[in-house]
Amino acid sequence: MLNTVFIIICALLNAICIWLLRLLLREEDNHIWKDRLKYLLGIPVGAAVSLSLSPVSVSSICLFALMGGALGELLSLFFLAVKQAYQGDSVCSYYDDGTPAKFFITGDKHRHFGQVKKFCKDMNTRRKDVLIILGDAGFNYYDDKRDDELKKEISALNITLFCLHGNKENRPQNVGTYGIRDFCGGKVYYEPKYPNIYFAIDGQIYTFEGKKYMVVGGAHSVENIKSRRLNSEVL
């Protein structure tokens, strides 16, 4: 009877810890469920410990597994909370005092930012300077941790990126990790983890150096157009 009570208590504690972990992990870099199983390693460890004790019973295995899970999850919660507290993920405020000093513009990057890195170094850019990328930056291409790794790498550059979505990448509004904030007279999509990478919102009007620009991103892929043309000829 006592074991049953402890099992129920530990099960509830596990449920609460898992719920809290899900909340904290929304701010983490990886979004793949397999990568999150490491936070539940306490469950098999606890079950293994119970097998070394005697007598071994189903209830003791369940109890130790849940106790191990709760302990592991509590430790994970602690370390995640500390990590996020010192991560400096607050939204940047570079634009509170007016427009950035310099604007630059470039075409599709397709995840290749070698020239951008060299440009930032050669031009001695600052975070308040803006590089406008006219489509297909490639930040939301794979929809997994590879995208986060690229964003983390590029967000370290001393510049702000203002990206128009292209036709070979996922729309930021479909990714699920973007919020909306003000930027140069309009609204942009942004992720707090990468405070200098913005995506323009279609139809918004932005003011750059005193001139207003309306943004309409995306296009039909040339490959798709050729395919449709060939299909129509066949038909």
Image (cartoon, grey):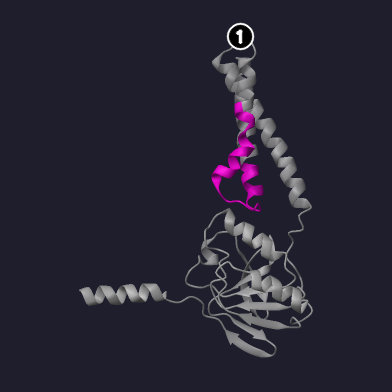
Query: Which residue is situated farthest in the left direction here?
Result: 235
**Residue 192 appears in the figure:** no
Residue 97, percent from left and from top: 79, 79
Residue 9, percent from left and from top: 64, 27
Residue at 61% from the left image edge and 32% from the top image edge: 12
The residue segment tinted magenta is: 19-44
Residue receiving disc 1: 55
Q: Main secondary structure of the magenta part?
A: helix
Residue at 69% from the left image edge and 78% from the top image edge: 130
Q: Is residue 212 magenta?
A: no
Specify the quadrant of the image occupied by residue 16: top right
Crowdedness near tag 1: few (<14), some (14–19) or many (≥20) residues, C-alpha within 10 Å = few
* 54 vs 151: above or below: above
* Viewer-side residue, 105 vs 189: 105
* Viewer-side residue, 164 vs 65: 164
What count of labels does the image hold?
1
**Residue 190 appears in the figure:** yes
Q: Quadrant of the C terminus?
A: bottom left
